[in-house]
């Protein structure tokens, strides 16, 4: 399965923020949407960073309550690993496992087209495995 197929089954729209938004604003957006990460877009709508729940916890641990007044550009992960719609589910699982992160923006020709979370990956991988099991049971039953 390729990432483009997963994106078709997801809601449209990706939660984004700007580099000058505060960490508190970002935390409120994450909490209100019940999501784990938000992409930071630059002036040309390109992905310049990402802030996850883990990033916010790290900032609070390092800076205390002052972390909430920091700007996204001060606490975001800048080297964002991205993929395209043509990447496979297996490639994304490997990338997430090696990088120890749970969200990957989908970018094509410099434009943000979606985001894939570990939840998306697990859901679709489970569906693939269940389909294979059903096919094997059918094969064995007709044996």
Image (cartoon, rainbow, N blue to C red):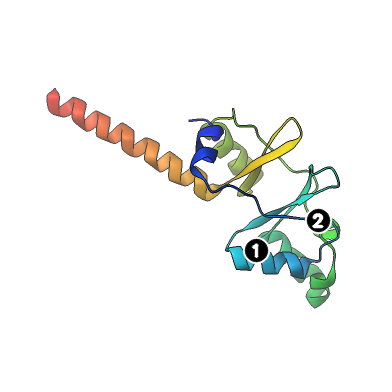
Residue positioned 79% across, 72% down in the render: 68
Residue positioned 47% across, 45% down in the render: 122
Seen from the viewer's position, the closer of residues 77 and 44 is: 44
Q: Is residue 40 left or right of residue 90?
A: right
Seen from the viewer's position, the closer of residues 105 and 65 is: 105
Q: Provide residue 63's location: percent of width, then percent of height.
A: 82, 71
Mark 1 residue crowding within 10 angstroms, few (<14) / some (14–19) / many (20+): some
Task: State the image quarter where residue 57 is shown.
Answer: bottom right
Furthest residue toward front: 12
Q: Provide residue 103's location: percent of width, then percent of height.
A: 63, 48
Q: CA distance from mark 1 to mark 2?
A: 14 Å
Residue positioned 73% across, 37% down in the render: 111
Secondary structure of the residue carrying numbered label 2: loop
Furthest residue toward bottom: 65
Q: On the image, numbered disc 1 is attached to which residue?
A: 30
Label annotation for residue 55: none
Q: Up-down: is 43 above or below 72? A: above
Seen from the viewer's position, the closer of residues 15 and 125 is: 15
Q: Is residue 22 left or right of residue 16?
A: right
Q: Provide residue 89's location: percent of width, then percent of height.
A: 52, 34
Q: Badges 1 and 2: C-beta atoms under 8 Å apart?
A: no
Q: Up-down: is 10 above or below 22? A: above
Q: Is residue 73 left or right of residue 34?
A: right
Which image quarter is the C terminus in? Answer: top left
Q: Is residue 85 left or right of residue 112?
A: left
Label annotation for residue 18: 2
Mark 2 residue crowding within 10 angstroms, few (<14) / some (14–19) / many (20+): many
Task: State the image quarter where residue 115 is shown.
Answer: top right
Q: Up-down: is 26 above or below 107? A: below
Q: Earlier in the sequence, mark 1 or mark 2?
A: 2
Secondary structure of the residue carrying numbered label 1: helix
Q: Provide residue 90's location: percent of width, then percent of height.
A: 52, 33
């Amino acid at each position: 399965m390729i990432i483009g197929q997963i994106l078709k089954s997801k809601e449209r729209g990706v939660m984004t923020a700007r580099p000058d938004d505060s960490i508190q604003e970002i935390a409120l957006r994450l909490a209100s949407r019940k999501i784990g990460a938000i992409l930071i877009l630059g002036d040309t709508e390109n992905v310049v960073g990402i802030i996850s729940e883990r990033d916010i916890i790290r900032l609070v641990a390092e800076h205390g309550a002052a972390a909430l007044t920091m700007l996204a550009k001060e606490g975001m992960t800048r080297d964002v690993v991205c993929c395209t719609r043509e990447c496979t589910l297996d490639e994304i699982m490997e990338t997430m496992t090696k990088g120890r992160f749970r969200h990957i923006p989908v970018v094509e020709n410099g434009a943000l087209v979606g985001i894939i979370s570990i939840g998306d990956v697990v859901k679709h991988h489970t569906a693939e495995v269940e389909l294979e099991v059903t096919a094997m049971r059918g094969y064995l039953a007709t044996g």
